[in-house]
Amino acid sequence: MASTARNRTRVILHVDLDAFYCQVEMKRVGIPAHIPCAVQQWEGLIAVNYPARAAGITRHMRRAEAKAKCPELQCVHVETIGGDAGAGNDSAVTWEDRKTQKACLERYRVASAEIIAVFHEVAPDAIVEKASIDEAYLDVTSIVDVHLQACDGESSLLASSAQLPPLESPGCGNHVIGGALDLGSEFERRLAVGGQLACQLRAAVKDKLGYTCSAGVACNKLMAKIASAMHKPNQQTVIPPRAVPDLMKDMPLKKIRNFGGKLGAELQALGCSTAGDVLAFAPATLHQHFGERAPWILYTVQGNSDEPVQVKERPKSMLAAKSFEPTSDMAALERWVTILAEELAERMAADNKLFNRRPKSLHLHYRGGGGGGWGSGDRSKSSPMPRFLKAGPTAPVICEAVMRLFQKCPDAMPCTRLAVAASDFEDGPLSEDQGSITKFLSAGSGKPTWCSLSFSFHCKACTFRRMRAGCYTRRSVSHRYHCNFMCARWKFG
């Protein structure tokens, strides 16, 4: 596994929202950015903004403890549904409400989708991989290629396009590991443009949605993620290849993606706490302990990664869950199923509107019979999803189907947790406004427009082979038809 020049020509961004849940709630409630703020779920804090962190407040701290330490702390409760759910301020929800309400993260999912939409709007040629609700990878290699081709020389690189902000602009907050970028180096010229793009994306998210984010710019996903965490909040970091060896030498293993959990524990048992500790081992010694994984381990701790950025925006499944005190009261359990079914039905409807797809499978997960923590007593039952009409299954229909599944679970009592999930999505039929394929193929002449939606809708051939040459489609046509017809019949580029 040798790092190649080809790998170094990639330009990968990792964009991470700053204290995301807090930003969403502060925008909604109207809390100024300089005020210490935390998002609470029942009595614990699940998100803390940077002013609160400066005051010594940390995640998982109890609300009462945090308020005692920082009296000016503004606590906003995560949205709750069921029972007499409050409006989301810190006084509307109490610990007792946990018995009749459940936390809901829909606000953050909606905000996350808005941010991804901004990425596509600002950088339509980028490959966007949603890594979690508050972070994403972007492969902007093709955009960098086009930009560099438009430059007439390295001296004009950073001034060649008025559309890209200079890295030295005050609002960019740009940092370069290992000293200023050398524009005489092909690799570093590419990263310079990547840094400009990162700055542009961050500014667009701030201007359009009001959220700040931090970014990392590097030649692979591993280093881009490490970079984004180095200077926060509202800043960005570029790591050129020449800086990687010194940086990785003292990099804690827990900060390297995929080096937590069992692998991290195994390396810790060998006395390794940093990437440099691992590199100090002879390859034969590592192979003795890790077998076929040894070459990958050595390759990765040197800051290398060939993992591609892949489109991941559509969730593979949806789940609504609630844990509670042990109960065998069927009326109470049915009430919880009703609340979970309402949440799932709303998410399915929103997903269908956005992606035009429908889940084929319905799942009930339950913990009962005296089961302990997650996984120790969890079981499940599945069935086909109830018939999906135009508006999708209603909450009562889902609830009825789930209760039928529950009746087939004699080991569920006393029950301590319920979850309702949807999975196995398939494309839905075309809507009226999408038109027919015949109308599409006979549509008026003229150059088709760039696709306004994610490349996740495209077939693999379009996404990975055609996109950089210019993959076009019409806005009003289903991307299923794009895959089935356009790849064969349309010219690209």
Image (spheres, rainbow, N blue to C red):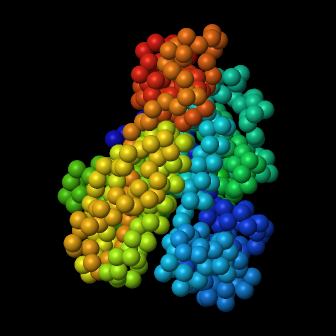
- State which quarter of the image contains the C terminus: top right
Q: Residue at x 79, y 47 (%)?
A: 169
Q: Nearer the viewer, residue 401 or 427?
A: 401
Report x, y in % for residue 264.
35, 65
Q: Quadrant of the N terminus?
A: top left
291 lies left or right of 451: left
Residue for point 22% across, 60% down: 289
Q: Is residue 62 above or below residue 261?
A: below
Residue 360 showing in the rendered view: yes
Quadrant for residue 319, please give it. bottom left
Residue 417 versus residue 128 in the image, above or below: below
Q: Nearer the viewer, residue 420 or 149?
A: 420
The quarter of the displayed image where residue 75 is located:
bottom right
Residue 433 placement (x, y as % from top left): 58, 28
Given residues 163 and 47, the one toward you in this image is 47
Instruction: Kindly identify the residue that appears in the image at 29 percent across and 53 percent down.
Output: 383
Q: Nearer the viewer, residue 17 or 399?
A: 399
User: Can residue 463 be seen in this snapshot?
Assistant: no
Give percent across and percent down for residue 233: 67, 61
Q: How many marks?
A: 0
Instruction: State left or right for residue 385 relative to residue 212.
Output: left
Q: Is residue 79 left or right of residue 278?
A: right
Q: Quadrant of residue 44?
A: bottom right
Q: Residue 240 at what x, y percent from top left?
A: 57, 45
Point 70% across, 56% down: residue: 211
